[in-house]
């Protein structure tokens, strides 16, 4: 099985000069391709910080993070931007769509940054919007979409570039239960059918219930890690319709 | 897509963008209007110099202008006139006898330049007849008629019909005095010129100087001002042993004023644009501050600093360019209107203007040749204004920006 994320002795300390606070403390984490993993823990346990470190949005104070054989802690700021563009998909808690772009343009945005040809862009976007059930909302601006729809567009945007894995920071936190369930169905299906690796930080029991692996963080350290379940195991899919 | 995003971004806060676009429009309108006024003033000044003072070109004996010594003469005016009028760039020619003299009246005396003219040909070159506001001008019936400027008339308390005495040296360096009668009082837009120049009939002056049909100066008016260099070259080639000068050489202060005024105009536009730049910088900084989280997200997704810079640059340029057409249109309409109607500043600056040789009636002229430069200044303003906001955006760390 291919290792996608390999983090060794990763630490992130805030206020190092005064009263040090270990947001992430000596964490070891290995994620295989096709995993559907939830990172859980109480507020302030370091979930988002760890996700930011793995996503190359922040630099650890010590340790190494190797993604697909590349140690991202050694990359420069510009190299990191390029690495993120090619390898990592992000889904944020508050959707973070670009308000002046339509749903289609939001998803297309990342493909344009990757300089993907127009025909290929359109093909991918239409297929993705079909998968997320928003083919009729392609030309709507985010303000005209519900929270659940916006988060689905964010998922489409994250997947459009065909990343190595998707990092989702509390993706269901701002959604009602029906929208959250729909979103989880979509992500579980993409994980199952396309083998896309997902790593969530979450408080949401619904996400935890669907995850095949749950890593619990307490005070910046991994306190519990359920065994990784191979991708051939199906993630439970809700029967609820969108 | 970056252009599309930049354009849509500037309309996220409509009021703010409209306000800054209006500032650009007003700044541009003000800059172009100042430019148009200066151009109008300069054109009028050049017109005055050519029409009232020098003509487009003058020909003298090479030694004459050193001391205005009356012995340095040109002769055979008819031959000169026919030779000069041979060139199709030439519109009109007049010959003049010129001497420096002392004008005396019972109330005082003044140093003047006496210009002996042939009224008919002179009127074609310097439009002298049109500038006579008091008296009848040269009647041709009496001897020793003189035209004096309004300023000199006021100073010497002269009226049409008054007597004056002119004293000068003839070609043999003997002093000659003669009484003249004021036949008319002229007024040009150049007060110093009015105070210094007296016009008499060339035959009367030649008789006193004892130079028969000779003269000192040929004043030439061209059909088109643009032919100045060509006509000068043609005449100099035709009359190589004489001094051919253009108005720019005869009146270097006017040429200097015109060329330096160009720099002043750009400085004024630069100052207006500098003030505008601070408005643009403020607006763009606000726009970036409001979108910190969004920009952080874009960087997180993989938008590099160059693209981010380009986006901010495009937003700034588009915002600035939005205000450009209304500014241009307003400036063009206003200039076009006042170009026909004229702006009369005689009530508050007439004396000042005329003492510097400027008309108090200004006909602004839209600065077409300078338009490209002005547009470049506007674009440069936008480019310079975007550097600080773009650098600010480029310094945003995605993690911190996403927390906002």
Image (tube, coloured by chain):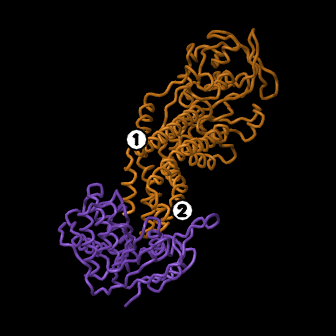
- The local secondary structure at tag 1 comes to helix
In which quadrant of the rendered view does residue A137 lie? bottom left
For the image, the number of numbered tags is 2
Q: Indicate left or right for B302 with A212 as reference.
A: right
Question: Which of the two residues, B391 or B125, is positioned nearer the viewer here?
Answer: B391
Question: Which of the two residues, A168 or B82, is positioned nearer the viewer here?
Answer: A168
> Label 2, on which residue?
B395
Residue B140: x %, y % from top left = 58, 17
| Chain bearing mark 1 | B
- The local secondary structure at tag 2 comes to loop
The color chain B is rendered in: orange
Bin the neighbour count of mark 2 within 10 Å (Cα to Cα): few under 14, some 14-19, many 20 and up.
few
Q: Indicate left or right for B237 with A26 as reference.
A: right
Q: Is residue B373 above or below residue B347?
A: below
Q: Mark 1 or mark 2: name the one nearer the start of the chain.
A: 1
Residue ID at (37%, 45%): B14
> Label 1, on which residue?
B329
| Chain bearing mark 2 | B
């Amino acid at each position: 099985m291919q290792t996608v994320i390999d983090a060794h002795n990763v630490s992130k300390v805030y206020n190092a000069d005064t009263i040090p606070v270990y947001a992430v403390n000596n964490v070891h984490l290995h994620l295989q391709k096709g995993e559907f993993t939830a990172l859980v823990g109480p507020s302030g346990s370091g979930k988002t910080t760890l996700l930011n470190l793995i996503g190359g949005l922040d630099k650890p104070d010590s340790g190494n993070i190797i993604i697909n054989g590349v140690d991202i802690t050694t990359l420069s700021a510009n190299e990191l931007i390029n690495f993120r563009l090619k390898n990592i998909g992000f889904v944020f808690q508050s959707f973070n769509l670009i308000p002046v772009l339509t749903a289609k343009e939001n998803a297309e945005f990342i493909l344009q940054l990757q300089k993907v040809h127009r025909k290929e862009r359109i093909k991918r976007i239409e297929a993705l919007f079909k998968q997320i059930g928003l083919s009729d909302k392609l030309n709507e601006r985010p303000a005209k979409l519900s929270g659940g729809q916006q988060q689905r567009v964010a998922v489409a945007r994250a997947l459009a570039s065909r990343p190595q894995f998707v990092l989702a920071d509390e993706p269901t936190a701002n959604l009602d239960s029906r929208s959250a369930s729909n979103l989880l169905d979509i992500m579980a299906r993409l994980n199952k059918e396309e083998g896309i690796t997902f790593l969530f930080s979450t408080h949401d029991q619904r996400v935890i219930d669907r995850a095949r692996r749950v890593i619990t963080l307490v005070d910046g350290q991994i306190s519990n890690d359920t065994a990784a379940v191979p991708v051939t195991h199906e993630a439970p899919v809700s029967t609820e319709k969108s | 897509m970056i252009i599309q995003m930049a354009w849509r971004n500037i309309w996220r806060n409509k009021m703010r963008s409209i306000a800054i676009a209006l500032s650009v429009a007003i700044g541009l309108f003000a800059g172009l209007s100042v430019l148009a006024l200066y151009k109008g003033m300069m054109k009028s000044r050049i017109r005055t110099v050519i029409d009232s003072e020098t003509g487009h070109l003058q020909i003298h004996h090479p030694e004459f202008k050193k001391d205005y010594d009356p012995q340095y003469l040109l002769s055979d005016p008819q031959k000169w006139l026919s030779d000069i009028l041979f060139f199709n760039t030439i519109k009109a020619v007049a010959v003049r006898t010129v001497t420096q003299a002392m004008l005396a009246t019972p109330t005082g005396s003044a140093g003047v330049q006496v210009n002996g003219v042939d009224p008919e040909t002179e009127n074609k070159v310097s439009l002298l007849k049109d500038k006579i506001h008091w008296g009848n001008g040269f009647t041709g019936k009496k001897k020793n008629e003189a035209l004096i400027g309004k300023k000199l008339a006021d100073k010497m308390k002269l009226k049409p019909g008054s007597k004056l005495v002119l004293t000068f040296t003839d070609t043999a360096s003997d002093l000659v005095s003669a009484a003249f009668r004021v036949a008319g009082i002229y007024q040009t837009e150049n007060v110093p010129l009015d105070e210094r120049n007296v016009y008499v009939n060339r035959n009367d002056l030649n008789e006193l100087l004892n130079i028969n049909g000779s003269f000192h100066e040929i004043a030439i008016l061209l059909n088109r001002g643009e032919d100045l260099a060509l006509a000068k070259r043609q005449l100099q080639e035709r009359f190589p042993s004489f001094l051919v000068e253009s108005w720019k050489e005869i009146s270097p202060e006017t040429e200097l004023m015109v060329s330096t005024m160009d720099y002043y105009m750009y400085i004024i536009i630069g100052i207006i644009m500098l003030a505008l730049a601070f408005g643009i910088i403020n607006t763009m900084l606000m726009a970036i501050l409001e979108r910190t989280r969004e920009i952080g997200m874009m960087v997180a997704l993989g938008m590099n600093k160059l693209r981010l810079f380009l986006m901010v640059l495009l937003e700034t340029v588009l915002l600035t360019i939005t205000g450009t057409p209304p500014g241009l249109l307003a400036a063009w309409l206003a200039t076009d209107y006042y170009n026909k109607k004229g702006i009369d500043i005689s009530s508050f600056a007439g004396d000042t203007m005329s003492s510097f040789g400027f008309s108090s009636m200004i006909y602004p002229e839209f600065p077409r040749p300078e338009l490209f430069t002005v547009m470049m200044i506007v674009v440069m303003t936008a480019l310079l204004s975007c550097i600080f906001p773009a650098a600010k955006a480029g310094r945003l760390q995605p993690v911190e920006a996403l927390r906002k």
